[in-house]
Amino acid sequence: MAFPGTVTEIEHLAPDVVQLTVSLHDEGFRFLPGQWVNFRFPEGVSRAYTIASAPERPQAVQLCIRRGPGRGGAALNELQAGAAITVEGPHGQFVLPDGDTRPVAFLAGDTGIAPVRSIVLHMLATDDPRKIVVLYEPDRKYILYAADFDPLARSGKITHVSGPIEPLIERYRAALSESVVMAAGFDPFLERAASALQRIGFDTSKVISESFGPQP
Ligand SMILES: Cc1cc2nc3c(=O)[nH]c(=O)nc-3n(C[C@H](O)[C@H](O)[C@H](O)COP(=O)(O)OP(=O)(O)OC[C@H]3O[C@@H](n4cnc5c(N)ncnc54)[C@H](O)[C@@H]3O)c2cc1C
């Protein structure tokens, strides 16, 4: 389904990474945390972006976007607050499995943190009792959504650690072995994460993953 809306805010989270906040005119828009939408820019270009905000706030949908080199990136450069856009969806199967009580371990690279933020905020909002581990590989030193994750990690509600993904996977191998593992990001990150999981003997066919495609 297509939902017309307005971009209400554009924030720069890191070099070449922006967060868009979108207000949809139809209050009936609903999504599962982890899903993505086709975002149609005012000039007609459309690109897939994953919802970074919790479904508890459907009136302010947030997208976390690395500016790409193509037409999507060019359209993003031109985008201004107040622009009329359309969102089609939601789509995708990167969602928490139903009826699985195991801890959840997320592997996220760069803006691959978008669906993870949505899922984690939802789990906390609904008092989900599952343990949460987030292993995050940032682009350089830019920890996206540190303002959300740092206080949660400090208070012990979640584990959130960042750095190159291979040593993190090695360090958390015990936690990973007993968890549902969900991985999101661009293909080179997902491939490196899969190789590191194989090295610790993890069955990668069990990983729930979302590919953002080639690295922009
Ligand atoms: C399921 C999914 C979720 C994603 N979520 C995010 C996210 O949350 N944050 C983020 O930073 N990036 C996300 N991406 C990547 C994003 O969609 C773009 O691919 C990226 O921003 C580069 O776009 P570009 O136009 O700048 O580059 P381009 O090089 O022009 O395009 C890159 C890719 O976009 C696809 N594409 C090209 N033309 C079209 C078209 N007309 N309609 C639809 N797709 C087309 C092709 O797969 C192409 O390889 C996601 C991708 C997918 C598939």
Image (cartoon, rainbow, N blue to C red):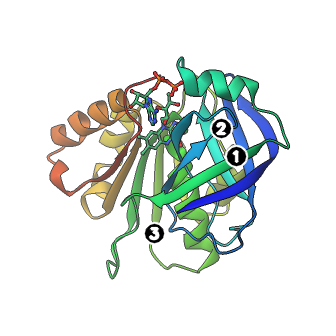
- The residue identified by callout 2 is 41
Residue toward you, 56 or 79: 79
* Residue reaching furthest to the top: 69
- The residue identified by callout 3 is 131
Residue 191 in picture, x, y percent from top left? 27, 32
Locate residue 100 relative to residue 48 in the image: left or right.
left
Question: Label 1 neighbourhood size at 10 Å, few (<14), some (14-19), many (20+)?
Answer: many
Locate residue 38 relative to residue 79 in the image: left or right.
left
Locate residue 105 relative to residue 28 in the image: left or right.
left
Q: Amino acid at mark 2?
A: Phe
Classify mark 2 as within 8 Å of ligand 1 or not, answering yes or no. Answer: no
Tell me the element at label 2: loop
Residue at left offset 54%, top offset 38% = 46
Question: Do the CB atoms of the residues marked 1 and 2 lie less than 8 Å apart?
Answer: yes
Q: Amino acid at mark 3?
A: Lys
Above or below, 99 relative to 42: below
Residue toward you, 191 or 163: 191
Mark nearer the N terminus (1 vs 2): 2
- The residue identified by callout 1 is 85
Residue at left offset 66%, top offset 73% = 56
Question: Do the CB atoms of the residues marked 3 and 1 lie less than 8 Å apart?
Answer: no
Tell me the element at label 1: strand
